[in-house]
Image (cartoon, rainbow, N blue to C red):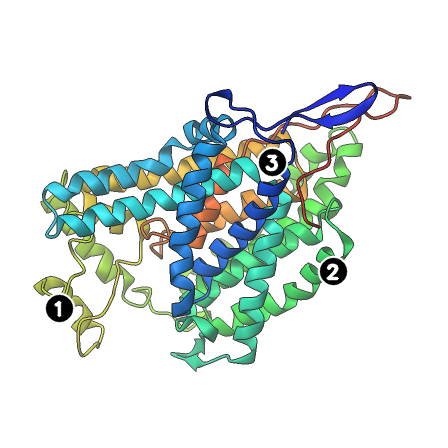
Amino acid sequence: MSTTVTGGTLRPARARGPAGLQLPRNFNETFSLIDIVMLATWVISTTMPFGWVQPLRYLGAAYFAGCMILFAPQTMPAALRAWPTFLLPVLCIVSALWAPFASDAIRKGILLAMTGVAAIYVASRIPGRQILTILVLVEGMAALMSLAQPNEAGGGWTGIFGQKNFLSGNIIILHVCALGVAFDRGSQLWIRAVSFGLIPIAMLLIVKAQSATIIALMGASTIAMTGHALFWVPAKRVRHLRTLLLFTGAALALISALVIMNLMQVDGRKAFLEAFGKDSTLTGRTYLWSIAERIMAEKPWTGTGADGFWRAEFGEANSITRFFFFEKFTGFSFHNSYLENGTALGYPGYWATVVIAVWGLWRTGMNWLRNQNAINAAFLVLTAIIVVRSNAEIDLAQEFMVTAFFLFIGATRKEFPPKPQATGSLPPPRAPERAIW
């Protein structure tokens, strides 16, 4: 909230509700604490694969939707910035006109919208440092439980998540958020220490899950975050040093690629896949993608309707699951967010997903350019990871996904550049950040 200075002392301004209604002076502080609790509840309910946590999603959705109205002066500008989050929900609801079951299409649209509403509220009310801290603590608990019960299946650990892709997807969030908090000098010492301790645990679980994509992204994110903290941030003190670092890094990457690909005659894609025991079809994904492309070509403007393809009564869906050796129909996907939405919603759904991905990268990138601290770097790196992962998973096509939730938060946040201080003058007084640590 904004602050005013009276008589030389810092005094928080009163929170205002809808239509300028003046709220009690401690109202905002009370809700700040509740916001933190509800964010933790939401992350737990969308991360932990336990039946008892599912009702918490609807409790969180109701809370965030209600508070969006209560704190409209704060949340409405953020909602306008986050307009791409509502593209898919609107298309899902419209597709109820031709979907096999209109109620399912409308339900999916509403739940996708609730995921966006929750992210908008969190982004407008909770500082980025606290958001990352909550993710570190919740995903850290999931990591420790997965470490205690690895549940190896299909060549890789699945932990408490049942599938290695779910395990690796959640743990890469922990890895990047832990790096961001660990390198953030503004975080409390205890949470930085916890984050440093969780980093090797996250790396072990990702390696044990044997997801080739996530292992590669883990390596890239570790280099990016470490290089940002050890080289990029200190380079600010030396004029033109950052430009030199950029050109040096690009030159080294280009030379390495030329040596490996041309001089050593190495097929990078083939070598990478063979290193992790993958075949050229990416474990059958290319087969799925060709089917999705054909369906989009057949129904370019409508698709099958939201929740209209993967149904037990649909013959082609059953054929695909039998092709992958499932004895009976089970939940499945095209393992690609763009093609998944394109199949359900036609080319409008496909391009709406592209817009969301580009919007997420653009907004988090601009926030980082305005204020190049570890927190903004973590949002940018993890958004890039989510966009890359969306080409092999349906993170941007499924409701209540913690990955999509994080992308929406990162893109909705509005970061302001730090104000320069006059030499020899005292820093201006600052309002304390809403925090519980």
Is 362 left, or right, of 376 in this rendering?
left
Q: In the depicted view, which residue is nearer to us: 174 or 25? A: 25
Q: Position of residue 314 (x, y in %)?
A: 10, 62
Earlier-in-chain disc, 3 versus 2: 3
Q: Is residue 266 visible?
A: no
Q: In the depicted view, which residue is nearer to us: 32 or 367? A: 32
Earlier-in-chain disc, 1 versus 2: 2
Reply above or below: 123 against 6.
Answer: below
Q: Is residue 337 visible?
A: yes
Residue 193 is marked as 2
Label 3 is placed on what type of residue? Answer: Asn
Contact between labelled residues 2 and 1, with CB atoms less than 8 Å apart? no
| SS at badge 2 | helix
Residue 319 is marked as 1
Q: Give the alpha-carbon distance from disc 3 to disc 2, as whole Å.
A: 30 Å
Q: Give the alpha-carbon distance from disc 1 to disc 2, as whole Å.
A: 50 Å
What residue is shown at x 41% (from left), y 40% (from top)? 65
Reply above or below: 204 against 365.
Answer: below
Front position among marks 3 and 2:
3
Residue 28 is marked as 3
Q: Quadrant of residue 98?
A: top left
Label 2 is placed on what type of residue? Answer: Ala
Earlier-in-chain disc, 3 versus 1: 3
Q: Give the alpha-carbon distance from disc 3 to disc 1, as whole Å.
A: 55 Å
Label 1 is placed on what type of residue? Answer: Ser
Contact between labelled residues 2 and 3, with CB atoms less than 8 Å apart? no
| SS at badge 1 | helix
Is 60 left, or right, of 245 in this rendering?
left
Residue 8 is marked as none
What residue is shown at x 58% (from left), y 72% (from top)? 144
Is 3 left, or right, of 318 in this rendering?
right
